[in-house]
Amino acid sequence: MMIETKLPFDQQYVRSFSEGRGEPDWLLNVRLQALAQAEQLPLPKPDKTKIDRWNFTQFSTHFVESAPLSSLEELPEEVKLLIDIDEEQKNVYVQRDHTCAYVSLADELKEKGVIFTDLATAVREHGELVQKYFMDGVKVNEHRLTALHAALVNGGVFVYVPKHVQVDVPLQAVYVHEKAEALFNHVIIVADVGSKVTYVENYISTCERSEAIVNMIAEVFALDDAQVFFGAVDSLAKGTTTYVNRRGITGRHARIEWALGLMNDGNTISENITRLIGDGSFGDTKTVVVSRGEQVQNFTTSVIHYGKHTEGYILKHGVVKDEATSIFNGIGKIEHGASKSNAEQESRVLMLSPKARGDANPILLIDEDDVTAGHAASVGRVDPTQLYYLMSRGISKTEAERLIIHGFLAPVVNEIPIERVKKQLIEVIERKVK
């Protein structure tokens, strides 16, 4: 049976929601135009994954107002583990469902002009800056899910780092999914010329199962000579249907690096695209995935080279068990004119169960002669030689498999710059593979 495609809210609802939040006319117009397009546009078509029966549109509540926190001590225990609450937190944002519950930024960063706040506040206080970048890296009319996102955005963060400002400590955002049926989270990160910033986000459910829809978009802009490190651990509950789209755009000699731990327990579509626009720019995407149960997941990672002397790297390691299905698509594309560029990618899939299915599909699209490109892919079981070696040293088979899996995923896990978040990712991996 096909999922109902009629949208649950009309133009009047969107208008009332926007006006109730005190949004400017430009954002209201974007919402209204996007909703009109969402009714006409098709769903995305991820390779080898049918999503026409997935529920992306049917939900009854679009905004849940949670009480703000007077202290991080009020957070659920599993959320407190992500934040070092024993130290004075100065660069942390916590969102409960759709509500900004806690936000703090160090005074010295505020004095330098750094902005780190919820999207709704940024729209009111920095409207021109938000307008310049909102739905610029991801276009409204790409497909139904991007249009629906633009129409119904109800959460997220805005980060701006002024020219030549170096943010030496990570900015951390934690999105706590408690009871919201529909989360449309939007993150914008702008690193102005010559600046540097690290941003790490967590999506975490406080329940074991949730029949919810999460539609999240992150847009990252690294202007000339800027550097952005973007880390993420997504850990949403079973039953949650997730669409995640993370995009990056680089200026001249800019860098964007991604370290993504995609640990959701529900069906997921993930798009991660880095556009290397400026000459000499650099993009590096590292992704780790664990799939289990009967979930279906599709992960597409692309690095597209436009500028000369650009470098793009893709590394994806996935573990699939039970009857789960995971598709890993990697695309390295060098456009005509992007001479002296280098596109490299590697996808490895480890299957732990006879009925698990993992596909690694590396693709190179080269429209320029004077370039370097390469790819590698493998799908298989735990290496019996490695297993035998460890067991011959007195390690049990279960523990040997655990060690091999952790070694397999380490290239991404070790990139997470916040120790508590890295520890959480390791614990999620332990829970999902045992």
Image (tube, helix red, strand yellow):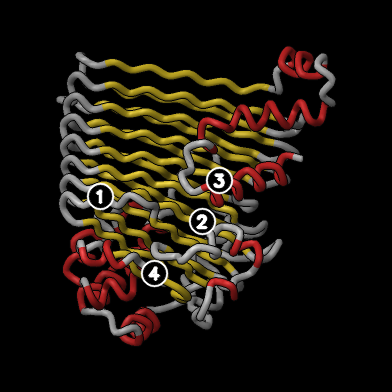
**Amino acid carrying mark 1 in the image:** Gln
Of 374 and 176, the residue lying toward us: 176
Q: Distance of mark 1 from mark 4, alpha carbons? A: 18 Å
Residue 58, percent across and down?
Answer: 55, 69
Residue 108, percent across and down?
Answer: 27, 63
- Dot 3 lies on which element? helix
**Looking at the rendering, which quadrant does residue 334 occupy?**
top left
- Image side of residue 363 versus residue 372, left or right: right
Q: How packed is label 1: few (under 14 Cα within 10 Å), some, or many (20 or more)?
A: some
Mark 3 or 1, nearer chain start: 1
| Residue at mark 2 | 202
Residue mark closest to the camera, 2 vs 4: 4
Mark 2 or 4, nearer chain start: 4
| Residue at mark 3 | 422
Q: Residue at x 22, y 33 (%)?
A: 281
* Location of residue 363 with respect to 245 vertically, above or below: above
Q: Distance of mark 1 from mark 2, alpha carbons? A: 23 Å
Of 231 and 356, the residue lying toward us: 231
Q: Distance of mark 3 from mark 4, alpha carbons? A: 22 Å
Give the position of the C terminus as an image quadrant: top right
| Residue at mark 1 | 166
| Residue at mark 4 | 104
- Dot 1 lies on which element? loop
Q: Residue at x 59, y 63 (%)?
A: 79
